[in-house]
Image (cartoon, coloured by chain):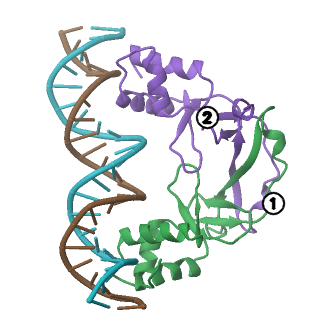
Chain colours: A green, B purple, C cyan, D brown
Amino acid sequence: MERNTKQRDAIRQVFEEIARPLGPNEVLEAGRTRHAKLGIATVYRTINSLVDSGWLVPVELPGEPPRYERAGSEHHHHFRCRTCTRVFEIHGCPGELKDLAPAGFRLESHEVVLYGLCARCAAD
Amino acid sequence: MERNTKQRDAIRQVFEEIARPLGPNEVLEAGRTRHAKLGIATVYRTINSLVDSGWLVPVELPGEPPRYERAGSEHHHHFRCRTCTRVFEIHGCPGELKDLAPAGFRLESHEVVLYGLCARCAAD
DNA sequence: ATAGATGCAAAGGGTTTGCACTTGA
DNA sequence: TCAAGTGCAAACCCTTTGCATCTAT
């Protein structure tokens, strides 16, 4: 990320304006409204360098390719809408997970993913 | 799954004897101790048909290819050892997740994944 | 001017599929 | 016997990489 190119500006803008985890293809499509010649390889390369620099963090959900979101929010989890497949950040955390680990196991971290309908899809 | 072949017997035995979620490659290696000529395509085909028939269920963890485990256990979650990468079934469930979904969202299901060290790796 | 960035197309890794051969019933 | 099942290799999909070209500085 040494130079400021139009492609990188477009990609950063996408993440700033669409405040939820995005996959490479979503970034490509949204980015093309800002810079029509954006290519998928540049999207991947830019996402990877934004992750390396700490500006993005990967959001991995079970059974799906990674999405990415802006770094900086505190510990949180995600909600995936099974209708529109969009993913949203949720706040709060169940806590109290230590009891679930078997005896002798050392618990270090956890993931929680909620599934259902987002407000828009639930409104139908 | 209409015929009983040596390959399918070997694969079913692997799942019956190793009681934790297994990926296709683990199944291939363990299966070859029972039937040396087992091929990876057969492992994939057999796993898929065992899933279709309800004998196996996929276990998807964030950022990893699917593993499979025998169907039939009640609602549960998984623990992944970050040292040996093996995955274990855990019992219990945090419950009380409804409050985490944003207003207007409809919660239908959830996943919880714990990470840390299994008993064997924690014993070092 | 020139090293970094881009776009295309080819290469990679894991999974699936086409096809000729093998095998269970 | 003979259709279902297998193994191999090619095809696939998504992601990464090589290379010639372009561009920010």
For marks 2 and 1 on the same chain, the one whose residue lies earlier in the sequence: 2
Residue at x 49%, y 29% (from the top left corner): B26
Q: Chain of mark 2?
A: B
- Between B87 and B59, the one lying in front of the other is B87
Answer yes or no: are tags 2 and 1 on the same subunit: yes
Q: Secondary structure at mark 2?
A: loop
- Between D20 and A33, the one lying in front of the other is D20
- Between C3 and B51, the one lying in front of the other is C3
Question: Dot 1, crowdedness within 10 Å: few (<14), some or many (≥20)?
Answer: few
User: Relative to A73, does residue B4 appear above or below in the rendering?
Assistant: above
Give the alpha-carbon distance from disc 2 to disc 1, as whole Å.
32 Å
Q: Amino acid at mark 1?
A: Asp
In this rendering, the label closer to the viewer, 2 or 1: 2
User: Relative to A121, does residue A110 appear above or below in the rendering?
Assistant: above
Q: Chain of mark 1?
A: B
| Residue A38 pos. (x, y %) | 36, 78
Q: Amino acid at mark 2?
A: Arg
Horizontal placement of A94 versus B60: left or right?
Answer: right
Residue A84 seen in render: no
Residue A4 seen in render: yes
Residue at x 42%, y 19% (from the top left corner): B32
User: Relative to B31, does residue A30 appear above or below in the rendering?
Assistant: below
Q: Secondary structure at mark 1?
A: helix
Q: Which mark is residue B86?
A: 2
User: Which residue is disc 1 drawn over?
Assistant: B99
Question: Dot 2, crowdedness within 10 Å: few (<14), some or many (≥20)?
Answer: some
| Residue B96 pos. (x, y %) | 83, 52
| Residue A117 pos. (x, y %) | 64, 61
Q: How many marks?
A: 2
